[in-house]
Image (tube, rainbow, N blue to C red):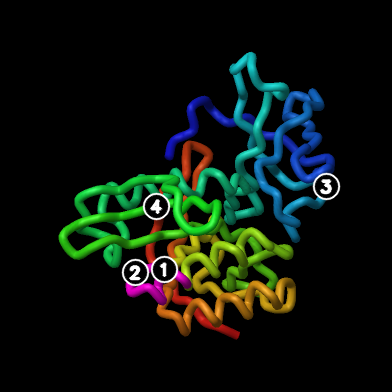
């Protein structure tokens, strides 16, 4: 996934009301940007952080900038949760997820369950595979990515839907995309959302599979990286 326009660097002043951020650009101008991340963004919203914004030229949108990345030394973090599906979708189409390769069709946002949409429905001679994607940005321990970073009732609902798919004999997959370049393994933040962790365990017992991948992140774009191991605390 390449950014449509060159990103603009600046320093974070504050993130507020979940979806807004004030940023001072390198030229000294202070702008308001859309923050495309509904989570807590724990550890990623401190004033002074080096951030990268994408200019928006769509007159239908209220804000001229969208917050896309954080640069912390050698570490890049992609904070756009919506980008995760685009990155994974490109990776699936290119066959870069070995466990999910070889399907004839890849459909996005397909209705299923109870008022839900699966991120990707893969179909081929071997049947169908339901794939739910979650963007992971939390890291409280060096090298360890954790999900979620806040209580997620929506995430718990998705796990229950996947569990029902697996219980019906169909293949269901939870794919965690780690949108930061400093992590080598993935786990659950069970202390942050015990309900999600409990639903996760039920889903695993039902047969839901877990796949984790990192993301390759630069100021030019975000692409699917290599596989990462998952451990349950």
Residue 212 on image: x %, y %: 44, 67
What element does badge 4 sit on?
Answer: strand
The quadrant of the rendering that contains the C terminus is bottom right
Asked which quadrant contains residue 183, the reply is: bottom right
Q: Residues within 10 Å of mark 1 (few under 14, many from 20)?
A: many
Q: CA distance from mark 2 to mark 4?
A: 12 Å
Q: Say which residue appears at 55% left-offset and 62% top-offset.
A: 158
Q: Say which residue appears at 32% left-offset and 52% top-offset.
A: 92
Foreground disc of the pair 1, 2? 1
Q: Say which residue appears at 65% left-offset and 32% top-offset.
A: 66
Q: Residues within 10 Å of mark 3 (few under 14, many from 20)?
A: few
Q: Is residue 167 magenta?
A: yes
Residue 225 on image: x %, y %: 40, 57
Q: Is residue 165 above or below residue 60?
A: below
What element does badge 3 sit on?
Answer: loop
Q: Is residue 186 above or below residue 30?
A: below
Q: CA distance from mark 3 to mark 4?
A: 36 Å
Q: Is 171 on the left-hand or right-hand side of 117?
A: left
**Among numbered discs 1 and 3, the one appearing first in the sequence:** 3
Foreground disc of the pair 1, 3? 1
Q: Which mark is residue 203?
A: none
Read off the residue under disc 1: 165
Q: Which mark is residue 120?
A: 4
Q: CA distance from mark 4 to mark 1?
A: 14 Å
- Whether tag 1 and tag 2 are in contact, CB under 8 A, the answer is yes
Foreground disc of the pair 4, 1? 1
**Among numbered discs 4 and 1, the one appearing first in the sequence:** 4
What element does badge 1 sit on?
Answer: helix
Q: CA distance from mark 2 to mark 3?
A: 43 Å
> Which residue occupies the foreground of this view, 8 or 45?
45
Read off the residue under disc 3: 47
């Amino acid at each position: 996934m390449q950014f449509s326009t060159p990103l603009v660097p600046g320093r974070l002043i504050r993130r507020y009301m979940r979806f807004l951020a004030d940023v001072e650009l390198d030229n000294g101008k202070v702008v308001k940007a859309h923050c495309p991340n509904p989570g807590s963004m724990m550890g990623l919203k401190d004033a002074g952080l080096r951030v990268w914004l994408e200019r928006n030229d769509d007159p239908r949108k209220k804000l001229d900038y969208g917050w896309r990345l954080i640069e912390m030394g050698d570490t890049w973090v992609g904070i756009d949760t919506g980008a995760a599906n685009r990155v994974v979708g490109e990776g699936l189409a290119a066959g870069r997820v070995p466990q999910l390769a070889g399907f004839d069709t890849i459909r996005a946002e397909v209705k299923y369950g109870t008022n839900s949409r699966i991120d990707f429905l893969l179909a081929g001679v071997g049947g169908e595979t339901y794939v739910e994607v979650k963007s992971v940005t939390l890291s409280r321990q060096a090298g360890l990515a954790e999900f979620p970073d806040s209580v997620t009732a929506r995430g718990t609902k998705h796990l229950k839907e996947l569990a029902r798919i697996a219980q019906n004999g169909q293949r269901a997959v939870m794919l965690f995309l780690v949108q930061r370049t400093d992590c080598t393994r993935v786990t659950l933040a069970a202390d942050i959302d015990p309900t999600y962790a409990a639903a996760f365990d039920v889903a695993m017992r039902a047969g839901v599979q877990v796949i984790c991948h990192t993301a390759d992140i630069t100021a030019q774009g975000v692409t699917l990286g290599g596989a990462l191991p998952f451990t349950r605390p």
